[in-house]
Image (tube, rainbow, N blue to C red):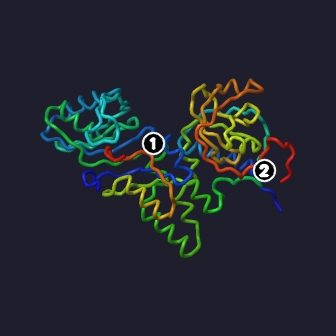
Amino acid sequence: MEERDVTKEGMSFIREIDEFCGYNRRWLVKLEGEPTDPRYGWLPRERPIGKYIEYGVINLDKPPGPTSHEVVAWVKRMFGVQRAGHGGTLEPHTP
Amino acid sequence: MGRGYPKVTGVLPVALQRMTRVVGSVMHSSKEYVCVMQLHRPVSEERLREVLSEFTGRIYQRPPVRSSVKRSLRVKVVHEIELLEYTGRYALLRIASEAGTYMRKLCWDVGLVLGVGAHMRELRRTRTGPFTEDRGLVRLQDVAEALYRFREEGKDDLLRKVVLPGEFSICHLPKVVVRDTAVESLIHGAPLAVPGIVMLHEGIKPGDTVAVLTLKGELVALATAEMSSEQVISERRGIAFRLRRVVMEPGLYPRTWKRREQKA
């Protein structure tokens, strides 16, 4: 059976985060070859679905009509979660 | 509710549960809009371009009467205004600006300077920090469908497409990757010392906000730098970062303090 290299997969995920917004500063390595133990935590894409949602974000297209605030309230209800927040309201008068 | 601003659409990143804690760093990042401005009387395109160019760079803006912040005069940076189309009555604009710049106000003020009056007809946000229209923008219907498929058919494939790992929302921050053995103590409030650091982005200066990640890429916390990147590389000890906002829950990584030997 082929062993997975979680450390390598983690590194490639970190690179993917940088690439998501074209962040191109160089990485400086302090500890060469430090591994991560696959028994702890998860590669972010492999979190069990409940955890995946708990640590998730949605790039949502706000529809016309409801305010940003209302849209977030809908999302909360749809997922049945207590907490959700948006990245900046689209209306100046909404708190 | 919201009838005053019916035609406002676009990129609205929504963080769920634990990721709500980092939403501020996305909220205070730059925005890009496409906006329809209606002029109350026509002006020449040349004149319009002239006035629009006066509204780029540092501008003064007093928040609208109905707003959630204190109405004192604020300086905002408008990076760019591009006139995409102009009919003499409607102007289609692409605007890139700092967070908290009011587009409705900008249109109004452009109208004042032009002397003919103007107002915002429609607004679409095309970018919020790292999130753009062309990188996996989803509609509410997509979310509803994905949840339905998961709840009714037990398949989470769509849900995993509609929801992104929250780590993507901090992509614009400098990052620090820590050893497995440092994670749990950070979550319990310990500062990040040099020996716990595996790698980090160059160019970090004391006072900068950084994202702390595990070697798997999981976001542990947001932190403030006490040392520069170069110092972290050259020093052997000392506190390099102080945690500001812990995102990760405790209990996922082993405790390594007090008892040094702990078999899993």
Q: Are marks 2 and 1 on the same chain?
A: no
Residue drawn where x is 46% and y is 38% of the image? B29
Q: Position of residue A42 (x, y in %)?
A: 69, 54
User: On the rendered image, what quadrant is the N terminus of chain A found in?
Assistant: bottom right
Q: Quadrant of residue B190?
A: top right
The numbered mark at residue B27 is 1
Q: Is residue B201 left or right of residue B77?
A: right
Residue drawn where x is 34% and y is 42% of the image? B68
Q: Give how far apart the Cα atoms at labels 2 and 1 are.
A: 34 Å
Residue density around tag 2, few if under 14, some if 14–19, many if 20 or more, within 10 Å: some
* Chain designation of label 1: B
Q: Amino acid at mark 2?
A: Asp
Q: Position of residue B6 (x, y in %)?
A: 27, 54
* Chain designation of label 2: A
Residue of label 2: A37
**Does B102 sit above or below residue B235?**
below
The numbered mark at residue A81 is none
User: In terms of secondary structure, where does tag 2 sit?
Assistant: loop
**Does B193 sit above or below residue A79?**
above
Q: Amino acid at mark 1?
A: Met
Residue density around tag 1, few if under 14, some if 14–19, many if 20 or more, within 10 Å: many
**Does A55 sit above or below residue B200?**
below
Q: Are marks 2 and 1 in contact (CB under 8 Å)?
A: no
Residue drawn where x is 21% and y is 42% of the image? B119
User: In terms of secondary structure, where does tag 1 sit?
Assistant: helix
B261 and B11: which is toward the camera: B261
